[in-house]
Image (cartoon, rainbow, N blue to C red):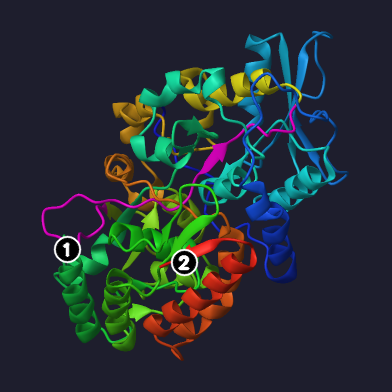
């Protein structure tokens, strides 16, 4: 693979979220009477959907790829996705699979797409055969039995080709409800010149991180070790997962555990609150003009970021181009190698599809073959793989990006990808994301402690889950 910069990383989680009433409406639309939906089983592979999912998308859809089939008898599949350049893979599939014709449409990135899918599912027609769905949103479609178990269509033959955690997150028991796609393993991404100036080495443990943050603040009162983006729930939860403080347990059905106030969660909150109170971390939103300016100017010395981070930062980096390096996330236990994931998508087949077998063939090819990844690893898609043959490819690990100079940040990110532990996302993440913007705002502004926000969030989510018919523990 050529040594070129990632020009556009499309999977910053949360970047495409819609707020307020629309997102809350999506949460209700996707859950679709959750408790009632939990009682039934997934449709059998032999049962075609009651209505065709090959119906055209809404008038707001943008045709990306396909659209005309050379083989008039080909099975027509509709695919919704927003990743830039993904249409190149769609066109390659159509060339090599003449009996199937896939049309890709972009109906909106993230939440706008989910709204349209939820509306189509509720209406009984118009849903795509296959769609891009983020890892954290997949359970919302699983609980309502709106996605197909891909095992009868051969999905398990691809299992060994993926990092275990990604396969775990698309599975419930023996069922596999989507093909895993890209991911966002995290690292300690730091300004090497700035840390060297103050004789600070990348911390191997979180205790060392705290000491380094205090030393930096003492040496330069205007500097911070990093920013703490309290209102970015997915970022926050990724760090909680690395600390064995994940606040949810869910394995399908009507029972869910919500635990933001247990000992592990409170210990996590206390650690970060100490740094927040000492103003050793910067209270700014993440992946923003402000946070990138602070990084470039040497105000923030590091970024607890994902594999897509360098590409997002690159357009804003001017003074610090070439200075940034990647190191493993600090560890809570010295000598451990626990990683975290922030971002990524899956590709389910929807139960409304009238062509489940053909749709499964496409989803499996798109994510489980070298032919597809050879395309999607390159710009403008630049997807970071959960696909082991690419993760283990030395040429992929040695990609350079200008903001990191001659270093190879993907060596750190690919190593992290194999040390991530899968997490059980709850089936109401859209609601959680919507509420978190309000609940954690006080932490970002310094008016509320992180522990207080955790306690408030516990009550908000538990009340919501019960209203949706879940039995809540924790």
Q: Which residue is mark 1?
A: 205
> Which label sits on residue 374?
none
Q: Residue at x 45, y 49 (%)?
A: 308
Instruction: Residue 44 in the image: state x and y as whole percent.
Output: 64, 25
Q: Using the image, determine if residue 285 lies above or below residue 330.
A: below
Name the front one of labels 2 and 1.
1
Region rendered in magenta: 327-353
Q: Is residue 430 left or right of residue 169?
A: right
Q: Is 444 included in the stretch rendered in magenta?
A: no
Residues at marks 2 and 1, CA–CA distance in whole angstroms: 25 Å
Labels 2 and 1: the sequence-earlier one: 1
Q: Main secondary structure of the magenta part?
A: loop
Q: Is 329 included in the stretch rendered in magenta?
A: yes
Q: Using the image, determine if residue 43 lies above or below residue 46.
A: below
Q: Residue at x 79, y 49 (%)?
A: 119
Q: Residue at x 56, y 59 (%)?
A: 429
Q: Residue at x 76, y 28 (%)?
A: 49
* Quadrant of the rendering where the C terminus is positioned: bottom left
Q: Is residue 233 left or right of residue 265?
A: right
Q: Which residue is mark 2?
A: 292
Q: Is residue 423 left or right of residue 87?
A: left
């Amino acid at each position: 693979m050529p040594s070129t910069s990632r020009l556009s990383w499309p999977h910053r989680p949360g970047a495409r979220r819609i707020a307020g009433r629309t997102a809350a409406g999506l949460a209700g639309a996707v859950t679709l009477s959750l408790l009632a939906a939990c009682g039934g089983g997934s449709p059998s592979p032999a049962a075609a959907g009651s209505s065709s999912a090959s119906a055209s998308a809404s008038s707001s859809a943008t045709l990306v790829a396909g659209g005309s089939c050379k083989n008039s008898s080909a099975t027509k599949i509709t695919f919704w996705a927003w990743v830039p350049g993904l249409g190149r893979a769609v066109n390659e599939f159509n060339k090599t699979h003449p009996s199937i014709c896939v049309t890709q449409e972009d109906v909106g990135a993230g939440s706008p797409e989910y709204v349209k899918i939820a509306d189509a599912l509720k209406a009984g027609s118009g849903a795509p055969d296959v769609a891009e769905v983020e890892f954290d949103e997949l359970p919302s479609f699983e609980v309502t039995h709106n996605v197909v178990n891909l095992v009868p269509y051969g999905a398990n033959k691809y299992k060994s080709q993926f990092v275990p955690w990604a396969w775990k997150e698309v599975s419930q028991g023996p069922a596999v409800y989507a093909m895993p796609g890209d991911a966002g393993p995290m690292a300690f991404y730091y300004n090497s010149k700035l840390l060297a100036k103050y004789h600070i080495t990348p911390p191997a443990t979180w205790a060392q991180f705290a000491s380094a943050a205090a030393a930096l603040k003492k040496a330069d009162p205007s500097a911070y070790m990093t920013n703490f983006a309290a209102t970015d729930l997915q970022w926050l939860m990724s760090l909680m997962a690395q600390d064995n403080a994940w606040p949810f347990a869910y394995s399908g059905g009507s029972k869910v555990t919500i635990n933001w106030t247990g000992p592990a969660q409170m210990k996590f909150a206390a650690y970060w609150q100490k740094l927040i109170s000492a103003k050793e971390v910067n209270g700014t939103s993440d992946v923003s003009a402000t946070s990138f300016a602070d990084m470039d100017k040497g105000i923030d010395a590091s970024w607890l970021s994902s594999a897509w981070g360098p590409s997002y930062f690159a357009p804003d980096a001017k003074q610090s181009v070439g200075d940034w390096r990647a190191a493993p996330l600090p560890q809570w236990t010295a000598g451990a190698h626990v990683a975290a994931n922030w971002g990524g998508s899956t590709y389910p087949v929807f139960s409304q599809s009238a062509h489940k077998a053909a749709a499964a063939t496409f989803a499996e090819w798109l994510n489980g073959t070298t032919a597809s990844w050879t395309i999607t690893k390159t710009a403008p898609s630049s997807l970071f793989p959960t696909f082991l043959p690419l993760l283990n490819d030395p040429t992929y690990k040695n990609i350079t990006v200008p903001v990191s100079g001659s270093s190879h940040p993907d060596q750190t990110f690919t190593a992290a990808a194999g040390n991530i532990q899968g997490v059980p996302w709850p089936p109401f993440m859209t609601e959680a994301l919507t509420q978190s913007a309000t609940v954690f705002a006080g932490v970002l502004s310094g008016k509320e402690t992180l522990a207080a926000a955790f306690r408030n969030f516990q009550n908000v989510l538990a009340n919501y889950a019960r209203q949706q018919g879940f039995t809540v523990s924790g």
